[in-house]
Image (cartoon, rainbow, N blue to C red):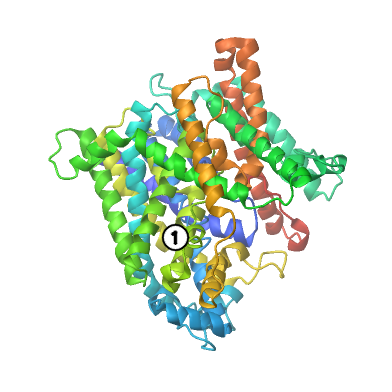
Amino acid sequence: MRLRKKTTAIGIGALGCLLIWMATPYNNFLLNNSFISDSYFPEAAVIYFLLVVLGLNPILQRCCPKWSLDRRQLTLIFAMLLMAAITPSQGLLRQLPWSLARTTQQINQSPALAEAIADAGLPHALFPDETGYEIETPVSNQFLDELYIDPSIPWAAWLRLTPVWGFFLLACWLMMTGTGLVLFPHWKETERLPFPLLNVYRSIFPDRDNGKLVPAMFRNKLFWIGAGIVMFLYALIGLNHHTHGSFPGFPLGWRLQAHFAEPPWLYMDAHILNVNKLYFTLVGMAFFMPNRVGFSIWFTTLAYGVYAMLQRAYFPPYYGGTVTDHRNGAMIAVSLMVLYLSRKHWLHAAKLLFRRVTSDADRLVKVAGWMLVSGALGMHVWLHWAGVAHLWAAVFVIIGFMVSLLIARIVAETGMPFVRIFGLIPSYFMAMVPAGWVTGAAIYMAGFINMIFQIGSRISAAVIVSHAASLDEKASARDQVNTAYMMIAILLIGFVVGGAIHLHMGYTQGSVIGDAYVPLNEWGTNIMGPAQRELLRWSGGAWRTPPHRMGNLFTGILLASGLYIACMLMPRWPLHPIGMLMVGHYYGHLAWASIMLGWTLKVLLLRYGGARIFRRAQPLFLGLILGEIFSAVIWTLVPIILLLIGVDPSRVGHIRILPT
């Protein structure tokens, strides 16, 4: 790509990145709207990109053709936007600064916690204020509760933390990016994983060959039928909400629990009998999933629901942690199986680290390998500096790698934009060893590992980089390497710029607009609570291993391993272990019914319409996906418009179309 074209694309992409970093905190937390950058198909990035493709580029083509954007420029812009969506919310900043301030505040208020933190030997450089019981914490207090009268924002206190946490985050992101880049070529070319989300990304790009500026999808009537149906249904819901019931609404779920009031149905899990909402994005994405994967997600959820119902009704007591233990065991098994299937590729990548490469493809793997290795080493060094023993630091690095591997695999198989890893939490495994084997620093820092990897897997760099670097089917390996370098830079800039926006919002706004009793970002503020409770339990001598955990964990490992082996040996075997990774947690609960509907429609189309009708129906399901994105943006703007024209904030209200 010529310098002028690359500079133009970077400039347009940088503007979009800045808008995402600025708009996301205020939209998500101050306005309490639908989240706009917390998925693998981030609404803010998609809408900005479509404005460029459908608005700016046709104007450039008509008025100044030499400045119109080609496919490679558009690919670069969209890759930048995807990467920019990681940091401003659940990928990082929804948690990090808020939890640091809350922890500092709680140490000041709790003598037991202050003593436990002091005994753990954590560096004071990790926190915005000095830590200790009854020590004043003005930086943290004002961030969480709004500035006192007249003082300025204490930028210096947070600037002091920037290099400390920036080094650790850079190491984590290098490991995530390296993992995604190392695995993508093998998964795509050797294992031939479907990457459904990558196909959806490419559908919003103009066609490369026919020279038309408008993507083919937007010229298809079925697309607009699908999008129109979704937007009409959400219009009913939105008007019903904003007119306080004067306009008829439309339910998108069901509540059947009241109709199953007798045993054994009385004991069925509530998330099966009551589905609050169907998500058209997931209905549409199920159309692009392999049949076995889509079936496994909803069937496994129902199967575990029936298991829990029968256990409660006929074989009490029911141990509620069984599903969690099985899921963790399945995650271990799937991680090991994925590594086993790619063992030759990993061996090749290891050899390339110390060899001179002769092809661009090998150069990509070598660069990705060094990213992975340097990130892992950087994480280990930083964790040890923070007081974690070498053994636990190595365990945390391995867990971070496994989480990155798993979330990348799940999205590569399913294309689900709303998903994260609920499992492999360090404290889960630490509770299985004697108290003398762990330290206070390891227990507390495990909370940050969980924050950055497990919670951050809602929009992980490992997934984004493996998709973004491959948006252009004809991109060379050298281009992909350059894209990876640029993405690391975007993550670091997003950490600084997005962090400054969060700080400004926290210090200048005390609560959600329209409700003075709802604090900003309460969920992210309390994210380190479990780590603090574990630390207090350990320091107070109450450390214990939950019953049945070890046996259930190995049961999950055996079940998932058996399912994976069956999938490899029998092409027609219907159950994939990915269903076990999704069972028993928030995103699995909200996804199963939508995926079941999409899977059913796909099966019916294939059976009664054949391959020809199936191919022709693809724009319809893309319309369902984009229609929900359009609706989320429209009904995010409505409250903003109402506030601007002077409507009382307490009467505006909000509807959240997409999951948080």
Rendered image quadrant of residue 159: bottom left
Residue at the far left in the pictured view: 356
Position in image of residue 74 (x %, y %): 39, 36
Rendered image quadrant of residue 29: bottom right
Q: Circle 1 sits in a helix, a strand or a loop, which is it?
A: helix
- Residue 37 visible, this orientation: no
Of residues 330 and 68, which is closer to you in this image?
A: 330
Above-or-below relation of 459 to 281:
below
Q: Identify the residue at image location x=70%, y=43%.
A: 308
Q: Identify the residue at image location x=56%, y=29%.
A: 575
Of residues 99 and 295, which is closer to you in this image?
A: 295
**Disc 1 packing (10 Å; few <14; some 14–19; many ≥20):** many
Position in image of residue 480 (x %, y %): 30, 38
Question: Does residue 648 appear to the left or right of 495 in the view shown?
Answer: right
The amino acid pointed to by label 1 is Ile
Question: Does residue 32 appear to the left or right of 5 in the view shown?
Answer: right
Rendered image quadrant of residue 509: bottom right
Position in image of residue 166 (x %, y %): 36, 64
Q: Identify the residue at image location x=39%, y=72%.
A: 161
Q: Identify the residue at image location x=30%, y=55%.
A: 375
> Which residue is the site of mark 1?
449
Position in image of residue 628 (x %, y %): 63, 37
Split into 4 quadrants, where in the image is the N terminus? Answer: top left
